[in-house]
Amino acid sequence: MKETYDIIVIGGGPSGMMAAGRAGELGAHVLLLEKNDRLGKKLSITGGRRCNITNAEPDNRLFLDNFPESKQFLFSPFSQFNVESTFEFFEGRGLPLIVEDRKRAFPESEKAEDVCRVLSDYVEESGNVTVRLNTSFESFVVEGKTLMGVKTSGGTFMADKIIVATGGLAAPETGSTGEGLDSLAAIGHTIEAPDPSLAPLCTPTKWVHELTGTTVDDMTLRFIQEGKAKHKVRGRLLFTHFGISGPIVINSAHKVKALLKKGSVTASVDLFPDYDLGSLDTFFIELFELEKKRHLNNVLRDVLQKKLSESILRRQDLRFGDTPVHEITKDQRKLLVKTLKDLNFPITGTMGFEWSIVADGGVVPKEIDFKSMTSRLFPNLYLAGDVININRPSGGFSLQLCWTTGWIAGTHATSV
Ligand SMILES: Cc1cc2nc3c(=O)[nH]c(=O)nc-3n(C[C@H](O)[C@H](O)[C@H](O)COP(=O)(O)OP(=O)(O)OC[C@H]3O[C@@H](n4cnc5c(N)ncnc54)[C@H](O)[C@@H]3O)c2cc1C
């Protein structure tokens, strides 16, 4: 006799744990399958291990403005479980949340592991959920047009309803390696090809790599194609050994990828975004007047990070760092100002899945009924979390989608 359940949830990440806990709470007999030896492996490394659990915008309309391509699908699920519900869920289970800049909410304890603990307690609390770790889902058992169960590395299990929460392809070392998407494709779902979406950007330019670890707290970054700035952002920039990173870069990756499909892209960094060329020149005239006895490399170090100012003064046309500033010519000063306003380098792509926070791709939204998270192809199949192709920014939006879609899948799989 094969083991039979009301509901099988595949994937023990945030969306799967939420779905399984909710279904168990409503009284369903649930099997939760996870191929790792623990639940929530990716969740435990989110937000630099602090877990940016949601984005604290209680107004559904304003929150969903961050999902320009899919907000029309999301109003219905967010009318059932939204940001306020997330606060109530976690705070009601003894995990107070704090809100930081850009409305990013974290557990007050600053520990992603605490979020995992609340969810695994939720999974266990009803006594209705059986968790099978180290068990890989392999394929669906299909009879005619009906899903009957799943084949796994630990045997075959049957169920009335199946919830797929196997994640996308970002950070594959945490378990999301794509078998869920392959199996959904095998039963006829359309899968948008996965591609790193929220990810750092790469350049082959050596001086950028050499600046690894250097952060600029406030600059403007423009992405230029055919001489025109196609996308512009302002904020913090981090240089890395392969290119550039930081929230504004990661959130630009989707747009930059689209530009790269059309042609080459150059990044241009403006280190003094509050000055135009003229006012920055005046700033340096006045600074050089005050510091006239000092050498340029020392003066520049007062206004820029050491590594960055050294890198700039190593450039072929700017090798006059050991000149006392009163000897700097007008042309040299203007060249320096122009460089500081336009440090440019080519962008060749995004870093791969192993570096990405979210990978584009997954089941296309039009094949899902978002009121209940049911597949439009199989009435007893439900989808939750990153398996669905929804483009979104960083800042807690991904996990909020997991809480919402997981809770709805668990609720509707139980009640229908
Ligand atoms: C480094 C990093 C930091 C992040 N930080 C944040 C953040 O602070 N805030 C935020 O909102 N988002 C963040 N994200 C994104 C967020 O983690 C994801 O959106 C979220 O984990 C998706 O949840 P999920 O349940 O859909 O999938 P996952 O978390 O990927 O979970 C899927 C689970 O399914 C299991 N699984 C897969 N295939 C099988 C199979 N064949 N059989 C059995 N089990 C299987 C996997 O092992 C995994 O445990 C971050 C992502 C990364 C990589």
Image (spheres, grey):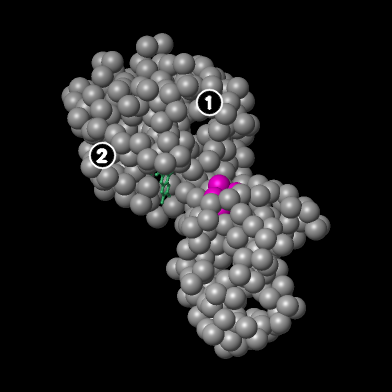
Residue located at (32% from left, 27% from top): 87
**Nearest to the observer: residue 255 or residue 280:** 280
Precedes in sequence: disc 2 or disc 1: 1
**Crowding near pointer 1: few (<14 within 10 Å), some, many (20+)?**
few
Q: Is residue 283 above or below residue 415?
A: below
Most distant residue in the bottom direction:
322
The label shown at residue 62 is 1
**Nearest to the observer: residue 65 or residue 133:** 65
Residue 37 screen position, x and y as percent: 26, 48
Disc 1 marks a residue whose amino acid type is: Leu
Which secondary structure lies at badge 2? loop
Q: Residue 73 magenta-drawn? A: no
Which secondary structure lies at badge 1? helix
217 sits to left or right of 25: right
Residue 285 screen position, x and y as percent: 64, 71
Q: Is residue 344 above or below residue 256?
A: below
Magenta span of residues: 248-253
Q: Residue 252 magenta-drawn? A: yes
The label shown at residue 124 is none
Q: Which residue is mark 2?
A: 108
Residue located at (49% from left, 22% from top): 60
Residue 280 screen position, x and y as percent: 65, 64
